[in-house]
Amino acid sequence: MKAAIVRFPGSNCDEDAFHAVSGILGHDAVYCWHKEHDLQGADIVVLPGGFSYGDYLRAGAIARFSPIMREVIAFAERGGPVLGICNGFQIACEAGLLPGALLRNASLRFVSAPVHLRVDSIATQFTAHYHVDQVIRIPIAHGDGRYTADADTLARIEGEGRVVFRYVNANGEVTEAANPNGSMRNIAGVVNARGNVIGMMPHPERAMESLMESSDGLPLFTSVFESMLAKVGA
Amino acid sequence: MTRFRLSIHIVPRRGILDPQGKAVSDALHSLGFGAVTDVRVGRYLVVETQADSADAARESARAMCERLLANPVTEDFEIAAVSQA
């Protein structure tokens, strides 16, 4: 299996994602510069975190028009799995791959801290290795993570079980205090209607092994790689 | 073709939490501007472009806003002025 890690000018979690795929899981990983037009035959695409184009205009607004994004959108339309982390989530929303938008944190502060998330759906190829309502601990590091969508969109994604991760306290309860950025309904991660594009503000690639203090991000990566291996085997 | 200068205002849509606007509003209240009922903080862009007419320039600016300059989920835009540059 091969993952393409897309690099934009200003990406800064690309090497973490590469290490997660290659160093920890032992799969192939390749970098794709944003000006390229080829995903190099990848089975999985990662849009990593960072500050593409310095977050000019809006986070992700300019990156979404990078040449490689045409290939990423076509890949997603063919059903290929796309994992958008942090800035990658912002880019995916701007590109229309996911509903909603990520706005400035309600506190107006950049927040870098481990947070608790509740896994609200395991019916996706990214979360099959978790169990429902599992509480996991994964770091966030962002200034623009307030998930916002209109009422119809919220009702639709909730109704379709597309809210995958929510900010919760250690007991798994959705509370205002556990919401680090003011996201509507404490939403931390969503999938598209087809279930092959996920966006999340927390960083699973920074929680992959014990020395990172949490390995709760590992099941996300093993879930998606195993689902792709199963497809090839079938 | 003539060169036009476009003034474009982009603001958070009413009803969407604007923490910057709220912070500014609170500061204005504490300075004694108690009559202030709402503040929203957005962006102001000045774009110069070639076009056949002012109307064409305005149409072009609208397309720019819809495709890139404003986020249709959270922001409203207004093309406030079109003048020859």
Image (spheres, rainbow, N blue to C red):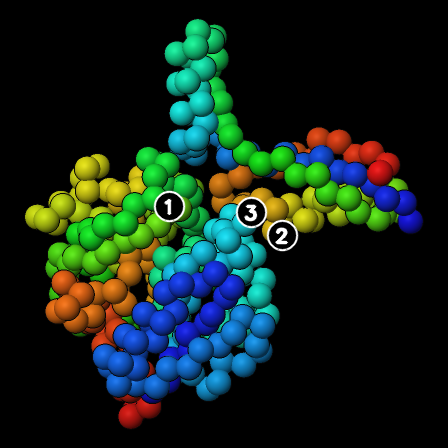
Q: Which residue is mark 2?
A: B67
Q: Are marks 2 and 3 in contact (CB under 8 Å)?
A: no
Q: Position of residue A19 (x, y in %)?
A: 30, 76
**Which residue matches tag 3?**
A57
Badge 3 density bin: few <14, some 14–19, many ≥20, Cα 10 Å: some
Percent coordinates x, y for residue A117 in the rendering: 19, 54
Query: From the viewer's perspective, is A99 left or right of A53?
Result: left
Q: Quadrant of residue B29?
A: top left
What's under tag 2, amino acid-wise? Arg
User: Residue A10 location, x and y as percent?
Assistant: 48, 61
**Quadrant containing the C terminus of chain A in the rendered view:** bottom left
Chain assignment, label 2: B
Outermost residue toward the right in this view: B1
Above/below status of A163 relative to B25:
below
Nearest to the eye among marks 1 and 2: give it. 1
Residue A223 makes an appearance in the image: yes
Q: Position of residue A209 (x, y in %)?
A: 16, 71
- Kind of residue sitting beneath label 1: Gly
- Between marks 1 and 3, how big is the CA–CA gap? 14 Å
Name the residue located 39 percent from the left edge and 46 percent from the top edge: A144
Q: Secondary structure at mark 2?
A: helix
The amino acid type found where label 3 is placed reads: Leu
The quarter holding residue A161 reads: bottom left
- Tag 2 and tag 3 share a subunit: no
Q: Which residue is mark 1?
A: A143
Relative to A2, say whether A162 is above or below: above
**3D distance between C-alphas at marks 1 and 2:** 24 Å
- The answer to whether residue A96 is seen in the rendering is no
User: Does A218 appear above or below B8?
Assistant: below
Residue shown at 28% from the left, 61% from the top: A203
